[in-house]
Image (cartoon, coloured by chain):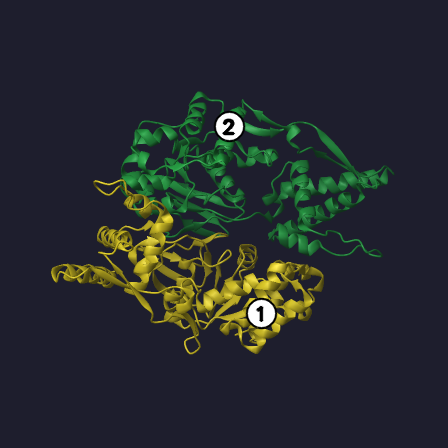
Chain colours: A yellow, B green
Amino acid sequence: MEKTKEKLEGLGRKVLKDVEKKENPSIEIPIRSLSNVMYDEKEKALRLGDKTSKRFFFNVAHAKKFTQTMMIAAFCKQLLGEKIHTSLRDMFYNLKRTFPNSNENTFDEQNESDPIIVDIEVALDTLREKLHLNADVRGRVVGQAKVVDREDVVDWSKLGSGGWAIPSNVEELKFKSVSADFILVIEKNAAFERLHEDRFWQKHKCILITTQGQAARGCRRLIQRLTEEYKLPVYVFCDSDPYGWYIYSVIKYGSMSLAHVSDMLGTPGAKYIGLTISDIHKFGLEKFTINTKDVDIKRAKDMLKYEWFQHPAWQKELNLLIKEKKKAELEALSGRGLKFMTDEYLPQKIKNKEFLP
Amino acid sequence: MEKTKEKLEGLGRKVLKDVEKKENPSIEIPIRSLSNVMYDEKEKALRLGDKTSKRFFFNVAHAKKFTQTMMIAAFCKQLLGEKIHTSLRDMFYNLKRTFPNSNENTFDEQNESDPIIVDIEVALDTLREKLHLNADVRGRVVGQAKVVDREDVVDWSKLGSGGWAIPSNVEELKFKSVSADFILVIEKNAAFERLHEDRFWQKHKCILITTQGQAARGCRRLIQRLTEEYKLPVYVFCDSDPYGWYIYSVIKYGSMSLAHVSDMLGTPGAKYIGLTISDIHKFGLEKFTINTKDVDIKRAKDMLKYEWFQHPAWQKELNLLIKEKKKAELEALSGRGLKFMTDEYLPQKIKNKEFLP
């Protein structure tokens, strides 16, 4: 927290220095448009390039945004000082007011304040969560680990049929003990609940996390922290369709819109355990597929071109989907029996190390 | 569980008796269309009327549905026997196959199997969850209570910054100790996290539940069980708009589409703590409102006619929204300061018993 505070204070001091030197106060912010996003093959992550732009106070086109940026930075410093966290929407309401002697609002809509948070994240090389601004929340976890959070010890193996609701912000959480051998990340809650009921995490010494769709930031950060601090392998388990594969790629490489925080949210070592189109034939799921829609085919064709999907194994799966015009959900495994996923599919994949990169 | 098993066996025995008597096998199912849904003023709940229909085996229009009903009932009996739970989608895949000597599938799409679950719920006067079929999951809880679930004791006051992820099925959960004086149900996670961080549940001896939007069945059932078993008052805290008020009414009275399970999912004693349109003026939130859309006005006008919104206090709020064309979100309270909700708004409302019925 002290480090983030220093970064915010550094921003303030820089602007103050401009004022004292009677220069036009400015802030330098890396450009986040797609033209400045690139895939870093070595680090296996989407990254921002080094193009930046400057925001000036004495500039008719910049003045409002400059002021908004300073307001939000000051607000974050206050949050850190008071040790409270809040949401982007609460911040918007809290800062919304009318500039003195004018009819101009500080912010009219939340879509003015949201991008500025990202600007500050990028400019200070930090995370929104470290600025005490919480993102949307989603995701549940159970398994072989204990964490310490706000002085409570939470044992992820003693949560009944529920799980630990992953908070939007896991920056201050500490791991007390982790006895898992790997992490299984599951796109859908139904599969998570089935595996939880079968105590898969106990038999296979692992941690189960459901993202409940696209992984929220808190969930991605938790996966990354677990793998960084405990060198745990991560296996991602999604529907066999472009949307499921995209969920995997965001967990692994980060996303294009959040390329500046890939190093803090991405898990480059993650592997894909399934489902694949090849699985449909290998595990006799032909009767349980769904016909693709035009949007699936279009998406698969786009993904064929992504640098981070160039591995032959992925090119094969993408081409198979386009050719067969079939996709399959995790639930398709239930066609082979309700415990097929727990007792056969996953153990076989793990034992034979049948992962996609 | 034994009771549900008996009900399923009763259904089977009845059909078997028809066969033995050489009668056309049939199942009697209460009608669920809106014409058979009514508001029970005395019980404060939406209810099904007593119209029923019969589904026959030897009837070209009924034969497939009759067979599907028996297949699903048998599947549920198997789930109970094996003590496993699954989702509606997994069940669909598990039962999907081709009838012998035909090209006809047992089920083509999940929208064929879903309504049959509801038919069985109604016919047997039970809950999908008691049939071991889990619904969608959503919702988090923290506060002054301990529960026992699958032999684990989960202390809702020792969950760090996260919470207990409410499972989709709370039928087998037991309460170990509940020292809360009331339950505060919150529509949005952001407000829940703020209150949780301020340890509102500790200062005010309560349980905090966020529904994260429309309350999932597991969440509604948990609220109902807590109030039934511990006589706890329930205060519901939603956005001041027709959608927020509808979320409240579903928690309290049940929904029209699930009128047959209102007695198991509804909490007739629930009260509405806010936000209201009157609050906007009372708490100086005028600068933090949002203009209503046409759909809000239309919805409010519909709600004016609902029997369960006839109380003058609700008629006043609905009419105010229509007149002022303004609505307000929970986050609007942050306009008055990030701790205004925790330190002023909620304590004042609770102290003065300012609730809507």
How far apart are labels 1 and 2 at the CA level?
56 Å
Measured from the top left, where is residue A233 in percent x and y? 46, 72
Give the secondary structure at mark 2. helix
Q: Quadrant of residue A15?
A: bottom left
Q: Can residue A241 be seen in this view?
A: no
Instruction: Pick whichever, A131 or B286, lies toward us.
Output: B286
Residue A319: image x %, image y %?
Answer: 63, 71
Residue B2 placement, left or right of B99: left
Q: Position of residue A83 (x, y in %)?
A: 25, 52
Residue drawn at x 36%, y 37% as measured from the top left: B289
Find numbered disc 1 in the image and state the secondary structure of the residue it sits on: helix
Instruction: Tell me the residue that label 1 is attached to.
Output: A347
B32 shown above or below A60: above
Left/right placement of residue A94 relative to residue B316 reads: left
Does residue B14 appear anywhere in the picture?
Answer: yes
Residue placed under numbered mark 2 in the picture: B301
Q: Which of B250 and A77 is in front in this view?
A: A77
Q: How crowded is mark 1: few (under 14 residues within 10 Å), some or many (20 or more)?
A: some
Query: Could you tell me the amino acid type at mark 2?
Result: Lys
Q: Residue B230 sits in which quadrant?
A: top left
Give the image location of residue A336, x and y in percent.
68, 62
Q: Dividing the image into 4 quarters, which one contains the N terminus of chain B? A: top right
